[in-house]
Image (spheres, rainbow, N blue to C red):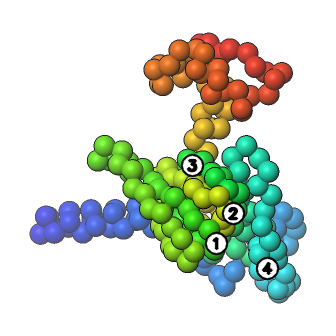
Amino acid sequence: MASHILVVALTLIALTSLVLASDPSPVQDFCVGIDDPNRAVFVNGRFCKDPALATGDDFYLSGLHRPGNTSNLQGSVVTPANVVQIPGLNTLGISMVRIDFRPFGLNPPHTHPRATEILVVLEGTLYVGFVTSSSGNRLITKVLNRGDVFVFPEGLIHFQYNNASTTAAAIAGMSSQNSGVIMVPSTVFGANPPISDEILRHAFQADQSVIDILRAPYRPAATAVRTEL
């Protein structure tokens, strides 16, 4: 009997951990997020508009058909459609983004701490991949063409690269109203305040000249000083 109770308890703990790994389930039809606390209820990090005052605009966003401006160093741009742009997404646990690429543009290695991502290619060709957290940091990749779909598991480092001489675009769905994004290069080398040079030299087994080069794109000239412990 005791062993059965233990099994049930462990099962409940496992199920609870799975539930807590995603956005909380809504306890009402919707909760349009607003910043004004007057006549509102605080739910899931935002105040809820009185449901009687909700309109179609609270659940609406236009313009996702338009390509974004890819005139930057990476040659890609992400246009979000999350709870910030669509307040009606609050508590609903989903969002999406449009990603545009110029020829040979890259969406650098990054991770979404709160969401699994499913991506569909609208046009062009993309070389995509993610790195596992076990099994020797295995790299799993695929070349995608128009209409192809690929899934990036929650929390894993992944990337998308336009490996062609034409533009490319994709739409990605997220399993969170606000998935978050941690860009690996800019997070490590552009942290504020900076991660010390000593730590970076040890972590990357590189000399200071290499660290300086890696920091350069992310550090304003006014603060381009070495940081030691």
Q: Position of residue 11 (x, y in %)?
A: 28, 67
Residue 102 falls left or right of residue 136? right
For residue 60, which numbered disc appears in the image?
4
**Mark 2 near mark 1, Cβ–Cβ under 8 Å?**
yes
Which quarter of the figure is the N terminus placed in?
bottom left
Q: Earlier in the sequence, mark 1 or mark 3?
A: 3
Res 101 quadrant in image: bottom right
- Which residue is painted at 65% across and 82% down in the image? 28
Q: Considering only order in the chain, which callout, 2 or 3, is on the residue closer to the N terminus? A: 3
Q: Give the labeled residue for mark 2.
A: 167
Q: Which mark is first along the chain, 4 or 3?
A: 4
Three-letter code, disc 4: Tyr
Circles 4, 2 touching at the beta carbon (< 8 Å): no
- Position of the C terminus, as image quadrant, is top right
**Residue position marked by numbered label 1 in the rendering:** 123
Q: Is residue 194 visible?
A: yes
| Residue 179 sits above or below residue 123 on the image | above
> For the residue labelled by badge 2, is the local secondary structure a helix, a strand or a loop?
loop
Q: Spatial distance from mark 3 to mark 4, Cα to Cα?
A: 28 Å
The image position of residue 209, as x and y in percent, is 60, 15
Foreground residue among 49 and 77: 77
Q: Which residue in the rendered view is the most extreme toward the front?
A: 165
Query: Which comes sooner in the sequence, label 2 or label 1?
Result: 1
Question: Quick one: SS at disc 4?
Answer: loop
Left or right for 74, reference 33: left
Residue 99: percent from the left, percent from the top? 67, 63
C-beta proximity under 8 Å, tags 3 and 4 = no
Residue type marked 2:
Thr
For mark 3, what is the residue? 110
User: Which numbered disc, 1 or 3, marks the residue closer to the eye?
Assistant: 1
Calculate the distance from the C-alpha at mark 1 to the C-alpha at mark 3.
22 Å
